[in-house]
Each structure stands twice: as C-alpha cells, then as structure tokens.
Amino acid sequence: MARPAGKAEKNSEQAPATARRGIQSIEVGFRILDVIRKTGRPMPLKEIADACALTVPNVHYYLVSFQKVGVVQQHADTGHYGLGPYALRLGLAALEQFDVFTTARPIMAEVAAATGHTVFLGVWGNKGPTIVYRVEGSRSRPLLELRVGTVMPLLSSALGRNFLAHLPDALTRELLEQEMASSVPESHGGTAGNAYTMADVQAIRDEVQKHHISRCRHALLPHFTSLSAPIFDMLGEMKAAITLMGPVGAVDDDLESETARLLSEKARSISATAGWVDPEAR
C-alpha cells in the first residue's frame, strides 16, 4: 500500500528549519570546562560551581568523569582543578587540522558578494606577503597585477602592512630594508621624492595596531584602495589576512566604515575557528 504523500514529506522538508536537539549534559559539562579555560589557572571546586551557577555536588560529578578521560586533572597539593593532558592533545590536534584556506573561502565569498569588490587571501611566503586565493565581486575590475602567487610589497600594500605590523622584526627586516631603499611614502609624514624613514614605518605599524586593520591608497595600483584584516592562530600569531580592493571612491575605506567593520568581523571569525581568543573580549 502506497504511503500517503503529505505529512511525512512535509515534516521532512521542515526538519532543517527546526532547532537541532543536543545533549544538555554535554553542554553543561563544556560550560564547566570553559570556566576553567577562561580563568587560566587551577580552581577550587566551589569557585567553579559559583562561576557556572551550579551546585557543588553537580559540578563534582562532572569533574570526576572529566578526570577519568584526562580532560581535567586535580592537583594533589591544593585539590584545585585544571585542564588535563587530553585537553592539551585536543588543542594541538585542532591546531594541526585547521586549514586557513578551506575556512576562509566561503567567508571571502560572503565579503565579495556583500561589497561587490575583489577579496583575496594572503599568507607569509618564503618571499614575503603572497596571494594564495582570490574571489571576484560583482563590481570588480580585472586586476591582472594581483594573480594568485603574486608577492606583495610590505610598505605599499595593505596586506604587506598587516604583516609588517604583526610579524616579528626578524622575519620582515630584510624585505623592509630593501623596500626602504627604493620606496616613496604616500603619507605618514614622508616628503615626495624621499624614501621611507623608520618614523614612517613606525607610523604605519601604530595605525594598523590601533585600528586592527590596514589600509593602502594609490600606492600599489593608481586610483585603487585596499583594506586588510589579520587572521590569527590560537597562539595569537598572525597567519594570514583577507584583503578587499577596489577603486578609490567606490570603496569606503575609512578605518571606521561599515566595509572595514565587516572585513574585521569576518577575519575574527576565521581566527576564532583557529582557536584564537580576542584579548579585548576576555
């Protein structure tokens, strides 16, 4: 006998729209673990319970189970609870499995669709800031100078300035010295015809670190501007950046603009996937 069409199929179609049910005890357990993680030190049982708004006996049951699997350990001298060796192994495994390219691609597509402009992903390669992926927006102009594999300058690109502001000096020094000997500053106190000074370089670093985003107008390509937001790993080290580029006037490149806010927000979401915790949110 054929099953009447309608109710079963209807419920099946509606299933994705309904909230997926989880296991509440697991969610409570991870709430406890998150308190220990955020505190950054071993904690007494009552302090954990108070922070979770749970009873001491209830929290104790969870901690006993967590100790059995190594996610939590109890320190013999104080009786306090901290994260255990298995928590460390989980973190390291997550770090190894994180792929910035895979994570960034759909997010970059969102930014390109929302703004209509070219968005590219850059990493620090063996020759400096390097484009490894690119997404075109509906309003993008062909930018043949910015192919995948293109190495960008430190001083005259938003991507380069991002790395300049966040990487250790030892990594950027050689490339910086080469560019300073031949480059002309577009702003930051430089005089036309003169090379960048260390004061110019420090001003660039200060601006990027203050606004958590870099900007570069006219320098790389005439009449184009770009904004670049950094992507960090769980150790707080910059691993990549997403950069938006478009014609001056067509892109609102004010560092407090909606475009800058969107780019920064998306970069932070990629960083969060890598395990990064925003210091300002702690």
Image (cartoon, rainbow, N blue to C red):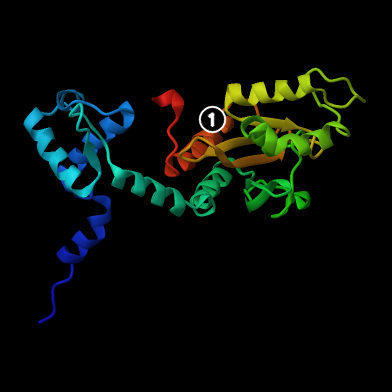
Tell whether 71 sits left or right of 138. Answer: left
- Residue drawn at 45 percent across, 39 percent down: 234
Q: Is residue 226 visible?
A: no
In this view of the protein, which residue sits in the foreground, 153 or 110?
A: 153
- Taking the view exactly as shown, the residue that stands out farthest to the front is 77
Name the residue located 13 percent from the left edge and 79 percent from the top edge. Answer: 2
Front-lying residue, 214 or 169? 169
Q: Is residue 192 left or right of residue 239?
A: right
Closer to us: 235 or 267: 235
Image quadrant in which you'd find residue 202 = top right
Q: Is residue 228 left or right of residue 146?
A: left
How many numbered circles are shown? 1
Residue annotated with mark 1: 261
Residue 97, placed above or below residue 223:
below
**Residue type at the position of mark 1:** Arg
Q: Secondary structure at mark 1?
A: helix
- How far across and how far down the image is residue 266, in percent? 50, 39
Q: Residues within 10 Å of mark 1 (few under 14, many from 20)?
A: some
Q: Position of residue 45 (x, y in %)?
A: 16, 28
**Position of residue 152 measured from the top left corner of the image (x, y, whole percent):** 74, 44
Task: Please state, as top left, top right, bottom left or bottom right, where the N terminus lies in the image.
Answer: bottom left
